[in-house]
Image (tube, grey):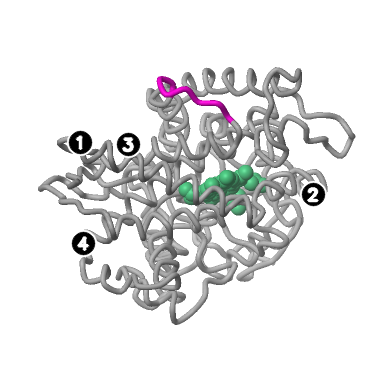
Amino acid sequence: VEAAAPVLDLVDSSVSLLWEGYRFGSRRFARAGADLFDTRLMLTRATFTYGEEAARHFYTPDRLTRKGALPLPNLALLQDVGSVQVLDGAEHRHRKAMFLSMMTPAALDELVALFEQEWGEAERRWAAQEHVVLLDAVHEVLCRTVCAWSGVPLAEEEVPERTRQLVSMFEGAGAFGPRNWRGQLLRHSAEKWVRGLVDQVRSGRLDVDDQRPLRVVATHRGLDGNLLSTAVAAVELINVLRPTVAIGRFIVFAALALHEHPEQRARLTDDDALRAFAQEVRRFYAFFPVVGGRVAEEFVWRDRSFRRGEWLLLDLYATNHDARIWGDPEVFRPERFRERSPGPFDLVPQGGGDHAATHRCAGEWPTVRLLERAVGLLAELSHDVPPQDLTVDLTQMPTSPRSGMVVHVRA
Ligand code: HEM
């Protein structure tokens, strides 16, 4: 079969990607009039794809490997050698089962209850302050919540530092240079902290309930029957702590959506409405731009052969904004999720795939649960939004309202 993908940017596009941000893919799909194009990133040939059909191919079992799928400095921040993100096949299924064992319905109920409690206490502190930068404030609430939920002891005076360490790991991930280095540096101190916790659990110096993530990673055994190395166990716990704090971005986007669409508030009358609003926030706003993989099993799509080792990227942002799926993608309209339920290959802010088989993000359910609860809490929060720059700059990855969303909370 002849290679038939349009080739754009014969020169390396890494700089354009950083310059253009989330819309890098969408613009080129439009220009090519196709749902795939070839380009070069980090001097390597890469094929960008988007849409439901592309996602279906991307998440066909065993078709792609995650080994070698991300450029290095970003890999070091977001995933690690030996961690779940770079495993394939049986080893991956076994490690993923470890994560899913933490997400029982009772555990998720507890997570939401802890979040509500932390939010309530934070609300009292916010009301005593002149202004609150919601992004920072919510990150802190989530750091307290996920530490309590995971069995991680967190002294009051540690809260700002631990929050900063976890936040910098995803804020630096889309960057090269200083912001990424800062992330690396803070990551080393976070790993040291968490490795210490794993050691304490293993030596019996720290007692943690059975189901809690800290205990789960410390006692998990691989397919070879061995405990994870301390380093890998620490990375896997960070794989729970870091993305849970990252849900703060979606919560701030929800606050922004409520601010910009005040008519929506009155419609948040039941759980279905909260769920639909949360899903539309995950679809409409931008978080992870793409997921990548290397072809492990050859396949043909759009008259084009994908050969072993080729680098394939699925554009998540473009898929969440695909007019073929959503009709009016640039309109924020939660009602669309009352008319239809999201499928495994259309709403993909946390990657696609069947939950039972190929979906990789272990945190989609906790994210939806916490976000819908946060929407309810935000709708009830008496607050003003003073004039400020709320621009969501799509050339920044990850992005957020430029001001971090400053609010004045009334007692
Ligand atoms: C993987 C996004 C929340 C745990 C991923 C991936 C994305 C993603 C895009 C890669 C998916 C793929 O390769 O197909 C997000 C976003 C979140 C979020 C936007 C919300 C802010 C969470 C939470 C947890 C979590 C709350 C855990 C409590 C993981 C893990 C992986 C992962 C362990 C690696 C899975 C693997 O490679 O097998 N996430 N996630 N995520 N996520 Fe999430």
Packing grade of label 2 (10 A; few <14, some 14-19, many >=20) is few
Can you tell which of label 2 and label 3 is closer to the viewer?
Answer: 3
Q: CA distance from mark 1 to mark 2?
A: 52 Å
Residue hosting label 3: 136
SS assignment at label 4: helix
Does residue 385 appear in the picture of this structure? yes
The magenta segment: 152-158
Q: Position of residue 174 (x, y in %)?
A: 43, 38
Packing grade of label 1 (10 A; few <14, some 14-19, many >=20) is few
N-terminal of the pair, mark 2 or mark 3, is: 2
Residue 217 appears left or right of 25: right
Amino acid residing under circle 4: Glu
**Answer yes or no: do the residues labelled 3 and 1 have beta carbons within 8 Å?**
no
Can you tell which of label 4 and label 2 is closer to the viewer?
Answer: 4
Q: Position of residue 254 (x, y in %)?
A: 33, 57
Residue hosting label 4: 260
Packing grade of label 4 (10 A; few <14, some 14-19, many >=20) is few
Q: Is 362 contained in the magenta span?
A: no
* Residue 89, numbered label: 2
Residue 411 appears left or right of 155: left
* Residue 168, numbered label: none
Picture residue at 53% right of the left edge, 31% below the top = 77
Q: Is 153 contained in the magenta span?
A: yes
N-terminal of the pair, mark 4 or mark 3, is: 3
